[in-house]
Amino acid sequence: MDVALKIWRYDPESGERALKRYEVEAPEWACLLDVLDIVKDQVDGTLAYRKSCRMMICGSCGMRMDGRAILACKERMKPIVDRGHVPVISAMGNMPIVKDLAVDMGPFWQKIRAMKPWIEPGYEEYPEGGEFRHSQEQMNPIHKEALCIMCGCCVSECNSMEADPDFLGPAALAKGFRFVGDPRDQAKVERLELYNSEHGIWDCTRCYFCNERCPKGVDPRDAIAKLGAESIKEGIDRDMGAKHAKWFVRSAVTTGWLRETELVPKTQGLVSAIKETKFALSLAKRGKVPPPFPPHVADKQHEARMLRDLIATQGRDGALGHVQGERALSRIEHAVMADPDHAGRRRDAPEITPGEAPVNRDIGEQP
Amino acid sequence: MRVAYYKGCLASLSAKELDTSTQALAPMLGLELEELDAVTCCGAGDIHEAEPDYYLHLNARILAYAQATGADTLMTICNVCTLNLRQANHMLQNDAALLARVSENLEKVGAPPYSGGVEVRHFLWMVADDFYDQLKLVAHKGLKGLKVAPFYGCQILRPSKLMGFEDPDRPWSLEAIIDACGGEAIDYPAKIKCCGFPIIQAREETALGELIQPIEQAMEAGADAMVTPCPLCHLSLDAWQQKLEASTGKAFRMPILHLSQLIGVAAGLEKSELRFRRHVVSMEPVLAKLEGPS
């Protein structure tokens, strides 16, 4: 088949960026990585990208296609060619570009290392018999996190990291839970303290880009939620993010509905809240600071309170509350919607993609 | 079409204008809303993070009360409610043992049981899909080609496996509605990105770094106003915009519409139903444009 694609080239020596079009002949079974190999072999030997295993396990070939972070070895080209589409290939976001499609993963590895990604077994001698045995059930809580191949697709799209480059981010935090939830690890509390840092768990903005992009089904956002649940279970709740989350629980138990006006002082503390008086007044003028009295109480609110007391005895606290739903959630296909019924109504999005648009930060300043 | 209506926390309090405009529009579209009184907050992702088992039960309780009305659809008007409820619903509908335990717990505290019989759908999807032809009739006053920047926000697009409505990278529903109302949809890359609201209190600087992208891009693309299907995005875009102006020295003054207000203007709703006076950024420039010569 004839394949056409456009590639964002970047030359580190001249600092020049250019979108170049390539057309090659490729076998029908070709994936994007195969096509890049053909381009490099037959058209332009200077094209730079990373690859190794070609089978979605090494995590080397992360890049963007039409603005979405993908693994080049996972994307089949035939359906794209059949549609007559010419995809735009660019480097991943949130990481500096080294050349063309290759990014500097240095900061990525630094954050993985900061999680202390090794087991702290809490013993020095092996037990009699030489091994510790663990059941599948004990390992289930970290089943998804253990699938991570550290390709960087989640980090590429992380909205919090765009605004705060120091955010530990989805890959590192998912790695963190892989150890927090490991029954062999004895350093859970120390880890949670570490991950509760300024740029840790509570810096996540819940944009769910990481879950959307992960090619292995790790669902990093859910791993971050597991870390949040374990932190609060262990009483590690001094972060404003943890206080914010706890206030929703408190609201549900006392009135059923969010006690919105009290959320700011309960999250930030009274002093910070007072500093925000001017801002709060500008909102109050528009009815955006509802008075806490009389409280907005849900009908039959006592049921919500009783439910919390009831389930406290059922052993699904902390991260287990997330794990219990994973089996069901994994039964849903992770597929882009292609509903022919909407063909008439659907408008083809214009040629703006995050990979192509000049305003996107991933194309910005380079070393 | 009769649906159970879950308005959530914000539309009950600080974003009442979203509720009044939705309630006023519903009968015009042919929607009968059955409001749920005995329901609580969905937890807004915060209870999901803090106490996930409690999150599941609170949402199951909302679903159970919706099912008890006899309606098969629970309509939401907030992205965050949509994700939280759909996620809980998927867990319960696809795991019989989990559903049995949760439903039994609901009955123990006196709530109705839940059998998985409700589908959670956002107002945006219902208008863009079920009521699209009706919308064209309802929006008789039009928008005089008003340039509107659609802002989807996150939790109505992602994770797409939980949403199942449109391509999360190339959504079309807001654009189709703007079209039908007689406006011109403006395109810009950040329309599918985050407004920063979930961390706007705990990490304001990071949140503002996210918020600035859609507002700045919409302005550069020449938008007269932005529209969003989520009251949390609305609060962030409308109320926190002044903080962006303070930190960047730029005057954005970008008017932000709830989806129901955008349709409401085109449908000729009363001022008392649209309640633009509850917005922080003035809607006057938009209204002046709509009242001016076409």
Image: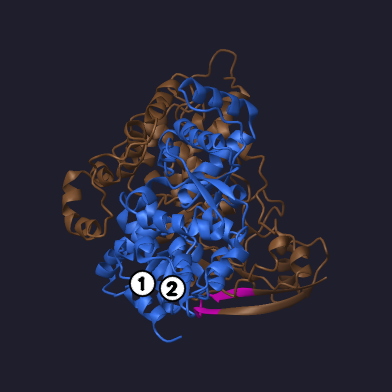
The quarter of the image holding the N terminus of chain A is: bottom right
Nearest the camera: B160 or A149?
A: B160
Rendered residue at 22%/61% (across/down): A282
Rendered residue at 64%/28% (across/down): B96
Within-10-Å neighbours for mark 1: few <14, some 14–19, many 20+: many
Decide whether residue A9 is among the magenta residues: yes
Is there a contact, CB below 8 Å, between mark 1 and mark 2? yes
Which residue is the site of mark 1?
B254
Say which colour chain A has. Answer: brown
Nearest the camera: B293 or A160?
A: B293
**Rendered position, A359 above or below A279:** below
Disc 1: which chain? B
Which coloring applies here?
by chain
Q: Label 2, secondary structure: give it.
A: helix
Rendered residue at 55%/42% (across/down): B87
User: Is residue A355 in sight in this rendering?
Assistant: no
Ranked by sequence position, the earlier of labels 1 and 2 is 2
Which residue is the site of mark 2?
B218
Looking at numbered disc 2 in the image, what kind of residue is underneath it?
A: Ala
Decide whether residue B196 is among the magenta residues: no
Q: x, y percentage for residue B174?
A: 54, 65
The quarter of the image holding the C terminus of chain A is: bottom left
